[in-house]
Amino acid sequence: MSDAVVEVSAVFDTILVLDFGSQYSHLITRRLREFNVYAEMLPCTQKISELSWKPAGIILSGGPYSVYLEGSPHVDHDIFKLNVPILGICYGMQELAWINGKGVARGEKREYGPATLNVEDASCPLFKDVDHSKVWMSHGDKLHALPTGFKIVATSENSPFAAIAHETDSIFGIQFHPEVTHTEKGKQLLRNFAIDICKAQNNWTMENFIDTEIARIQKLVGPTAEVIGAVSGGVDSTVGAKIMHEAIGDRFHAIYVDNGVMRLNETEQVYKTLTEGLGINLTVVDASDLFLGRLKGVTDPEKKRKIIGNTFINVFEEEAAKIKPASGQEIEFLLQGTLYPDVIESISFKGPSQTIKTHHNVGGLLDNMKLKLIEPLRELFKDEVRHLGELMGVPHDLVWRHPFPGPGLAIRVLGEVTPAQVKIAREADAIFIAEIKAAGLYKQISQAFAALLPVRSVGVMGDQRTYEQVIALRAITTVDFMTADWFEFDYSFLKRVASRIVNEVDGVARVTYDITSKPPATVEWE
Ligand code: XMP
């Protein structure tokens, strides 16, 4: 549970999604928020008596288990005592049936794919404007009898119990998945549930969130305490810093560490944007010599990562110790840019035998510094952070910037990282990104960069034979960075970029374009 003194879920009407481990569970939360209803996901094992807020409604997700098998997860029956509407999806529906008569068994065959929904009871409010639409089925178990007290409200060719509803209470079960985009009217159905049936207010907007979150931070930090946080120039840390600044002004101290492997002009840009543009109290530390010194002679990617991570912690702690708050108080809090997907990852239900993972973005800092954590973005998805950034005046280019790895160009200079090698990678990267922006392609691409390969290749420049290095360009599209496709540029675009890099960057004789997807390759080369 969050560090919050006031839970966001206590302020906004909240639909509680209890997760039984389906790969689609987080999409339920996602869809509800798309029509401005706040939703929060907790593991299906959540004890209702331990909730500090009352949900407006409850959704039981799908899951990979069979309700009738020993060891399968079951929901706390206190959900029924809350007297709020309940919707069971797939396993969630089978769980409702199991509790009310046990009529669940393995189907003759697994049903996977589209089906057409026939609504048999047009008066059911869940199905307003949903009849005869395509729905997505993905289940092995099915109901073979109607649970006690329930009636059929919709069928499909293979599912006589495609949807059921309680005769008197607001309890519904559906066999299909409304959260996936293959279900044509899935969002409408979730909307019917959340807004019409649960009467949840659709007031979850970033405009409203700003005020709530600023008030929450002010209450948590109190009138005098001080907060520090690392900023990288990326959207999450910048938006986090901006919201802290709005809440507590100069009692928030941002620290930016120049590790010597940042992109071209990055440090200057970050300084300008955060101080002049956003008014944030920022210290820039030039630690490039220290980082590059420690990286000398190191070629193993994992060693590079470790050196950069540890050096970052050393520098950050040293700088933090130099900050002497005017109040005379010690610094009490550390800002961390945790986003909701990290939270979901740490709380989603992975099965009875698996322990639930904890998450730390800047592993190591907290343990050493004995600081309390403050996470203003922990309720937000990435697109919500971007929207918030735009609303708070963070420059558009920064809000939409591609992600950049913590170890920076050190994992894009393959082999040993030297200042000369970093310079080549940096200049090639700047040309590639500038051309992508000039061609209007930046937003279509999820991440693009130049990597410097540790090989030499023969070339010819004028009448001279050259023997210089190779740049590999990489541009990918992805939703979640777990899988990725390479971006299909026009040949003329690639020709222009290659020509500019070879002509303008000393030390490069050849340019290649990486056409490997992930998997089997990764996004980064190291
Ligand atoms: P890979 O190379 O694993 O990259 O396919 C997926 C995403 O993660 C980023 N990445 C990192 N980010 N520290 C980071 O903060 C790292 O060590 C790291 N390695 C990869 C990569 O840029 C891509 O967005």
Image (tube, helix red, strand yellow):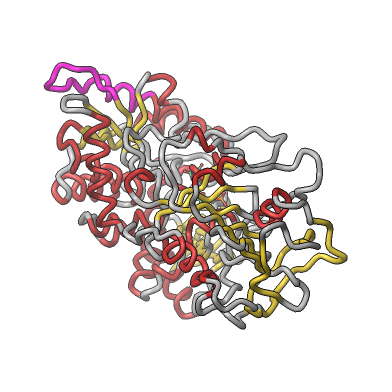
Residue at 61 percent across and 63 percent down: it is 167
Range of magenta residues: 314-332
Above or below: residue 279 compared with residue 523: above
> Which residue is nearer to you in this view: 236 or 412?
236
Q: Residue 81: horizontal and vertical position, in percent?
A: 53, 43
> Which residue is nearer to you in this view: 302 or 250?
250
The answer to whether residue 412 is seen in the rendering is no
| The stretch drawn in magenta includes residue 54 | no
Q: Quadrant of the N terminus?
A: top left
Above or below: residue 102 compared with residue 71: below
Q: Residue 38: horizontal and vertical position, in percent?
A: 40, 54
| The stretch drawn in magenta includes residue 318 | yes
> Which residue is nearer to you in this view: 207 or 505?
207
Q: Residue furthest bottom?
A: 132
Residue at 46 percent across and 57 percent down: it is 450
Residue at 35 percent across and 25 percent down: it is 372
Q: Residue 526: horizontal and vertical position, in percent?
A: 57, 46
Q: Residue 88: horizontal and vertical position, in percent?
A: 61, 57
Q: Quadrant of residue 123?
A: bottom right
Left or right side of 246 for 255: right
The mark total stands at 0
The answer to whether residue 332 is seen in the rendering is yes
> Which residue is nearer to you in this view: 455 or 428?
428
Left or right side of 349 for 144: right
